């Protein structure tokens, strides 16, 4: 079973897949925290600007790691209707969780962006990067927010993706591994430590 040593190696493998394309004024946006070390490798290899886009998972009640939706600091949430039906949940029941995650997205955006000017997205080729794609709901929230700022093109790039999630995206997705039995993102890394805020800030410097 092929696995990546760590996020940096995953980023280099992904960069090799993206290098053949002629990108116009590329902007690489990592999804904090784990997507940022991967994104940094891509930005370095493509000689592109690196920044972040913050989207927060809205977790199921009692199971915060199980994403039923996602939200950015200043957008409406996205929910997975099939998951809501399966768990017998409504959007209204998740409104307080959504508000909490929106506030956290705003806090992290402010922390990571510091006093840098707002993202300049218009008419640029934007590559959104995460360390893996499970349900994809967090990536979808980020992609929808970016699409509203008129990029020239929009691509999602991940080292590993769940096969069943790929078909739910309208945005082109580039993935190095698309295993038949996905399990969890961490399964495809030998080292999958929690990325810290300090590491994100260091990458952005």
Image: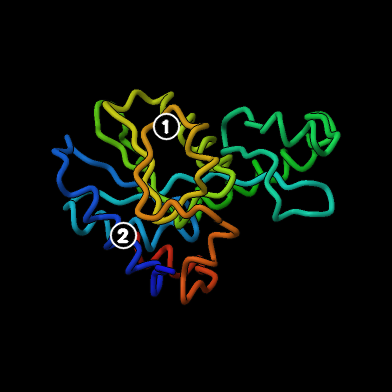
The residue identified by callout 2 is 40
Q: Residue at x 31, y 37 (%)?
A: 126
In this rendered view, identify the residue nearer to me: 145 or 66.
Answer: 66
Question: How far from the left and from the top, in percent, is residue 140?
Answer: 52, 35
State the mark number for residue 14: none
In the rendered image, residue 141, in percent from the top left (x then y), is placed at 54, 35
Q: Residue at x 45, y 57 (%)?
A: 131
Q: Which mark is residue 146?
A: 1
Q: Evaluate if marks 2 and 1 touch, with contact meaning CB atoms under 8 Å apart.
A: no
Residue at 61% x, 37% y: name it: 71
Q: Quadrant of residue 98?
A: top right
Q: Where is residue 96 drawn, in percent x and y? A: 80, 39
Q: Is residue 133 left or right of residue 99?
A: left
Q: Nearer the viewer, residue 49 or 155?
A: 155
Relative to 141, 52 lies left or right: left
Looking at the image, residue 111 lies above or below residue 28: below
Disc 1 crowd, CA 10 A, few/some/many (<14, 14-19, 20+): some
Judge by depth and name the residue closer to the eye, 87 or 123: 87
136 left or right of 104 in image = left
Q: Is residue 92 left or right of residue 71?
A: right
Q: Position of residue 91 (x, y in %)?
A: 78, 29
Q: How is the image coloured?
A: rainbow
Dot 1 falls on a residue whose secondary structure is helix
The kind of secondary structure element at disc 2 is: helix
Quarter where residue 120 is shown: top left
Of marks 2 and 1, which one's residue comes earlier in the chain? Answer: 2
Task: Report, in whole angstroms, how far the alpha carbon at label 2 lies from the one at label 1.
Answer: 19 Å
């Amino acid at each position: 079973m092929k696995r990546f040593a760590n996020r940096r190696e995953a980023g280099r493998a992904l960069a090799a897949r993206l290098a053949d394309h002629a990108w116009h004024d590329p902007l690489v946006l990592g999804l904090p925290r784990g997507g940022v070390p991967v994104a940094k490798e891509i930005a370095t290899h493509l000689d592109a600007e690196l920044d972040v886009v913050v989207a927060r998972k809205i977790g199921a009640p009692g199971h915060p790691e199980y994403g039923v939706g996602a939200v950015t600091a200043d957008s409406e949430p996205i929910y997975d209707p099939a998951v809501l039906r399966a768990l017998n949940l409504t959007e209204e029941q998740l409104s307080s969780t959504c508000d909490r995650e929106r506030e956290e997205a705003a806090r992290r955006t402010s922390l990571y962006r510091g006093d840098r000017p707002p993202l300049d997205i218009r008419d640029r080729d934007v590559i959104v990067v995460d360390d893996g794609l499970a349900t994809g709901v967090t990536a979808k929230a980020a992609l929808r927010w970016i699409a509203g700022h008129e990029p020239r093109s929009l691509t999602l790039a991940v080292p590993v993706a769940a096969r069943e999630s790929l078909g739910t995206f309208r945005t082109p997705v580039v993935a190095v591994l698309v295993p038949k039995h996905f399990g969890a993102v961490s399964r495809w890394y030998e080292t999958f430590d929690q990325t810290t805020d300090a590491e994100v800030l260091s990458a952005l410097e």
